[in-house]
Structures are given as C-alpha cells and as structure tokens.
C-alpha cells in the first residue's frame, strides 16, 4: 500500500482494539505510516460487533480502521507467535491497549521485546497506566470521565451526572499516545534507541481539566457544572434568541464593548460590567439584559450581525448541520474509504493539514478480519 505523509516508510504493529488504540493508529496511518492490525481469530477487534451496522458491517469499526491491514493471530499459540515475531522484527512501532501485564504473560512485554529490538518504540495505552494502585483495574471511557473529575463539571447545576457527548476519555488518550510516539521517533533519530511509552486514560483526563484544576490547585475551590457558561470569562456561553440559542464569546473588555455597541445597550461603562471580573460576578444580571435584546432576532440573523463586527459567535449545530457546513466541506473533514462488502463509506477526515502533503478525500481500504493474511505471510516469511 503506497502512502503519502511524513510517517511514510514506518511500520506500525497494531495490537489495539475498540477506540483508544485504534484512534491512535488511525492518526499514524493518516500521517503515512503502514499499520498492520493484529486481531483475535474469529472475533477480531471487539468493535466489529458495535453498532450502527451497514449490511452487517460495523460503522463504528470502519470509522476507526481505514487504511490498515488485518491479520488474525492468537498470541497464545506457538505457531502464531512465530508469525508475530517475524512482523515485530521489522516494526518501528508497537501500539497496544491490553490490561498491564497481558503481553508480559504472552512473552511480548516491553523488557523482553526491547532486548531483541532496541530501536522499537513500544506504546502502551491503558485505563490507569502501568503503575499505581489502580493499574490492574479495567476501565472504559465513562469510568475515567467520572474518576477524572470531568463529569463533575459537565452538565447543569443540580443535574444528574452527565457524560461528555463523545468518548473523550478514549480519544484524548489516543491523541496523547500518537503525540508521544512522534516525540519518541524524533528522540530515536538522536539516540538510535526506542523506548516504552506509558499512557493512562485517567492521567489524560486530569491533563485536560484546564480551568477546573487551576481553580482547585490555586484557590482550593471545587468547581461544579455550569451548563454552557465559562467559569471565569463573561459573556461566554449560550444565550436565548428569538428562535433558538447563540453562542457569544466576548473574551475581553474590547470585544464586550463592541458587542454592546452592536446590540445598542450602553452598559460597557457600568461598574458592574466594566471589566471581565465584574461581569463574572454579575453574570446572571448581565445574561438577562443580553437575552432581552437577543429575543428580537433569530440566531441566524444575530450571527450575521456579530460576524460583520468580528465578535466571536456561532449557532449550536446538530450533527447534520455540523457535518454539512461549507467550512467543514472546504476543509475536507468528511472523507470516504472503500469496504469490499458495502462499497463507499463516509467518515470524519484528518484535521492535520501539512503543506508538503496532499489531504485526499479518499482513504485506504477498510479491512475485513484477516483480509491480508496471505500478503503478510508472504512478505514476512
């Protein structure tokens, strides 16, 4: 498979399944790496059984595994271990998201593997990492969203616990793993040596707590959910209009003044609203004033007015609106790949745009389980 991208020529041995690992290796594949996906015989990646389905094929699986090759191997079986070892001997990167200790039991832990292949970059992504009292516990996205504090600041005050609307626990860990792999490749160019990368989904949730963790560590405050409202910038939330809601993000005093002039409400010199700190303290009163004015026009009308004055704003799109946006189409953020049973399948594109490389609107084929067995065995025999 010919690939174009900065990682062209690198071989990734992909031992991952479901989301965190496949998301990481999808990024690597989109950047040009060759990815050989090793799956469990007969059942394959768990996500092959996740809906929604198109002609009995999982759209969930297809959206994460474009452009990869598949071979089914049982790493407890001696013959399959030999095949795996031959591929491993040529690999630049191994990515796995088993529970810590699993690959060690099968003879492919980092210590043993690195002795044979010192240049190998070995990336492990797991719920809680390779160390610590929780390392052996199983974890799914929603578990770490809860344990990492994210759900405690999501939703509205006094509402039931609310999950973020996408699997951010898995996806952030997948992204951090791909970032670490690229840094390790740069380090290998300098040292000639590989390394072990240890990514914890829970760690990643802590890393993205942003304002919430800053408030706790600096002031001892324990933040709670605020709906759409920003905890320290105002106005910076969703406001009711005549027909729906509009996001207004007037992130500094000048933007606030400009917004007030557009709305024709002379409150920007009022001591209650003159600075961001004052506005944050009086946000409920400010919101009432703004929504009284915003109620006179539709969201689309207000967006046009604010955009002309360069005031950050936007509608709250549903998924259809978001995906079909002309901006998203222009940015090639919906791409297609071929599956030999269903034909063309559309999915999210790659947000990484690089000047020397094309960003094609079609991607590599989506593999059936064990589809590339013969090809891989012939190559690595």
Image: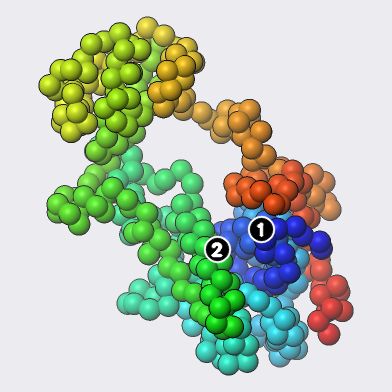
Quadrant containing the C terminus in the rendered view: bottom right
Image spot of residue 361 (x, y percent): 74, 43
Label 1: element kind? loop
Q: Which residue is mark 2?
A: 178
Task: Please state if 310 lies on the left or on the right of 185 as rendered.
Answer: left
Task: Please state if 123 lies on the left or on the right of 221 as rendered.
Answer: right
Using a 10 Å C-alpha cutoff, classify the residue at mark 2 as few (fewer than 14 neighbours), some (14 to 19) or many (20 or more). many
x 66%, y 76%: residue:
92
Can you tell which quarter of the image residue 267 is in?
A: top left
Task: State the separation of the CA atoms marked 2 and 1.
Answer: 10 Å
Is residue 170 among what the camera can see? no
Question: Toward the viewer: 272 or 344?
Answer: 272
x 81%, y 68%: residue:
372
Q: Could you tell which of marks 2 and 1 lies nearer the N-terminus?
A: 1
Is residue 346 among what the camera can see? yes
Q: Which residue is mark 1?
A: 31
Can you tell which quarter of the image residue 8 is in?
A: bottom right
Question: Height in image: 58 above or below 182?
Answer: above
């Amino acid at each position: 498979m010919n690939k174009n991208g900065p990682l062209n020529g690198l071989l990734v041995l992909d031992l991952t399944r479901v989301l965190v690992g496949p998301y990481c290796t999808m990024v690597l594949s989109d950047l040009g790496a060759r990815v050989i996906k090793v799956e469990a015989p007969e059942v394959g990646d768990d996500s092959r059984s996740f809906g929604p389905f198109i002609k009995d094929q999982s759209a969930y699986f297809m959206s994460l595994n474009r452009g990869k090759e598949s071979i089914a191997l049982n790493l407890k079986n001696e013959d399959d271990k030999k095949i795996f070892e031959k591929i491993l001997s040529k690999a630049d990167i191994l990515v796995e998201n088993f529970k810590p200790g699993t690959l060690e039991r099968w003879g492919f832990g980092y210590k043993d593997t690195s002795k044979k292949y010192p240049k190998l970059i070995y990336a492990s992504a797991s719920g809680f990492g390779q160390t610590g009292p929780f390392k052996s516990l199983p974890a799914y996205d929603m578990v770490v969203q809860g344990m990492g504090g994210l759900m405690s600041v999501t939703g509205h005050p006094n509402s039931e616990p609310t999950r973020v609307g996408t699997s951010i626990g898995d996806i952030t860990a997948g992204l951090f793993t791909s970032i670490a792999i690229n840094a390790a490749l740069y380090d290998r160019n300098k040292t000639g040596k590989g390394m072990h990368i240890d990514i914890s989904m829970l760690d990643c949730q802590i890393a993205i707590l942003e304002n919430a963790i800053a408030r706790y560590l600096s002031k001892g405050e324990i933040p709670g959910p605020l709906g759409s409202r920003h905890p320290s910038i105002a106005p910076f939330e969703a406001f009711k209009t005549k027909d729906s809601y509009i996001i207004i993000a007037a992130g500094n005093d000048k933007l606030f003044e400009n917004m007030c002039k557009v709305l024709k409400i002379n409150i920007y010199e009022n001591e209650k609203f003159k600075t961001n700190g004052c506005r944050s303290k009086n946000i409920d009163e400010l919101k009432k004033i703004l929504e009284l004015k915003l109620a006179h026009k539709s969201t689309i009308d207000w967006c046009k007015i604010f955009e002309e004055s360069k005031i950050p704003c936007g509608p709250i799109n549903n998924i259809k609106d978001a995906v079909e946006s002309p901006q998203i189409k222009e940015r090639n953020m919906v791409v297609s790949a071929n599956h030999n049973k269903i034909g063309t399948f559309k999915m999210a594109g790659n947000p990484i745009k690089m000047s020397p490389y094309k960003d094609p609107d079609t991607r590599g084929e989506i593999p059936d389980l064990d589809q590339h067995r013969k090809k891989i065995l012939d190559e690595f025999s």
